[in-house]
Amino acid sequence: MAQSSPAVSGKTHELRCIECGHAAEKPGQTFRCESCGDLLEIVYPGWKTDQGLRPSGLNVASLKALWRTRRKSLAPIDQSGVWRFRELLPEFPDQRQVITLHEGNTPLYELPSCARIAGIEHLLAKHQGMNPTGSFKDTGMTVAASVARREEFRWVGCASTGNTSASMAAYAARGGMRSLVLVPEGKIAWGKLSQALDYGAVTCQLKTDFDGCLRVLNKVVQRMPVYLLNSVNPFRIEGQKTTAIELLEQLDWQVPDHVIVPGGNLGNSSAIGKAFLELKELGFVETLPKLSIIQAEGANALVRTVRETGGNKLIAVQAETAASAIRIGSPASWKKAVRVLRETGGTVEQVSEAEIALAKAEIGAEGIGCEPASAVTLAGLKKLVKSGFVKPRESVVLILTGHLLKDPDYTIRFHRGEMFADAQEQKIVAAQQRAPIVLEPNADAVIATLKQADER
Ligand code: F0G
């Protein structure tokens, strides 16, 4: 039996435009405000009434206890690290309709060696790559795909740099729906393409970039009954909020000083920020972490938007980076991300290709590993420590978004020294390169190699 919630009333959600506040009774196919065209978000008017959570400290404590208890429950919905926190998500009265792969419940790791490298005392990483399909996307997909099924869509669709496509295809398959994937041709990691294919998606490689794929998909969903599962879908954002809730639970509700997130289309940073703001509003915590967003230099639309316009006008860029997950030039959720930066006091930073590759190998050398887009967090942290934004004694959590095995090509090219032609870049990364060694099949050769390695 799933564990029911203590008296939480007035929880019903509403969809509202982030720009003009217009309430959307029923979102259109593109999840845009019908009045001004901006993005929608989910709000919970009931939280602000006398019957809601807010006035009663008691409810907060009992919810914290309930969420812990659910970890021991055998019900699939309780075993999900997303639905375990369902009191802070849109209501889903018929729980049999929920599509879950037991997402969430991801580990929080210490990174002592990376902390030393970055120049701080204590560093943690929450590894969202340990989700069922290998990325954080599963936490949002379980919610939004369940909504698609409840609304009786036969088809779901997304544009993707890889992870969204794998996640959507898996959840669609589990929920008995068909899925349409649009990916930029030649620009996503094979590991991800292979997942979408195996999970049964109709996979189209378009001769454009991610931004172009999203434009095409927006047209498709206006002409066909395909449910859009990109992060402009506000139900995705609600599911992804649980990363922050679970993180605080793992820290026994002690708020870290900084949380650092990679930025692509900017749904994830918006979701994590939204969760922190809501948790503070509801009285789960009294302070906020500073949430900072890191981008690749070649895909730095948010960094430029913040630095050149104070966050007031999007500066889109032609994106180019080997961290293919964040090769995005015109991030859809930029306004939501700017709001999170402002309200939490976080900042933005950009990092070079060599800095990303080096940081990825440093995280790998701790026995953890992640995909290139996730490693921008450590690369960015190093810069934030140097600039004094992060102080050596402050607590920092990196959000690692994707699994090391997403992009083995990148990793192999890095270690073989095939990634950087430029001598300066090669110098930056050399210390972390560990190329495989081809030997004659005898013990002497292996022992000689072992001894050599031992001296290093
Ligand atoms: N890290 C990874 C591993 C990602 O796959 C993505 C986005 C991001 C970070 C950036 O997150 O877009 O919410 O700011 N991947 C998308 C995809 C776009 O299609 O898989 P964001």
Image (cartoon, rainbow, N blue to C red):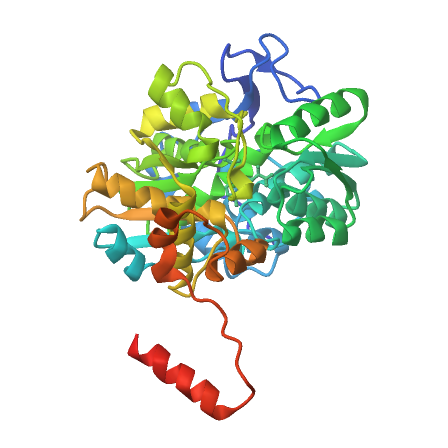
Q: Residue at x 44, y 55 (%)?
A: 68
* Horizontal side of residue 82 vs 274, given as left or right: right
* Horizontal side of residue 380 vs 372, given as left or right: left
Q: Residue at x 51, y 12 (%)?
A: 21
How many numbered markers are drawn? 0
Give residue 258's position: percent from left, percent from top: 30, 41
Q: Does 170 sit above or below residue 408?
A: above
Quadrant containing the N terminus is bottom right
Give residue 413's position: percent from left, percent from top: 52, 57
Q: Nearer the viewer, residue 133 or 120?
A: 120
Residue 346 visible in the snapshot = yes
Which image quarter has ligand 1? top right
Q: Residue at x 48, y 43 (%)?
A: 242
Q: Does 382 sit above or below residue 348?
A: below
Give residue 244's position: percent from left, percent from top: 42, 43
Q: Residue furthest bottom?
A: 443
Quadrant containing the C terminus is bottom left
Residue 150 falls in which quadrant of the image?
top right
Q: Nearer the viewer, residue 248 or 131?
A: 131
Q: Residue furthest top?
A: 35
* Horizontal side of residue 110 vs 295, given as left or right: left
Q: Residue at x 43, y 51 (%)?
A: 357
Residue 1 visible in the snapshot = no
Residue 35 falls in which quadrant of the image?
top right
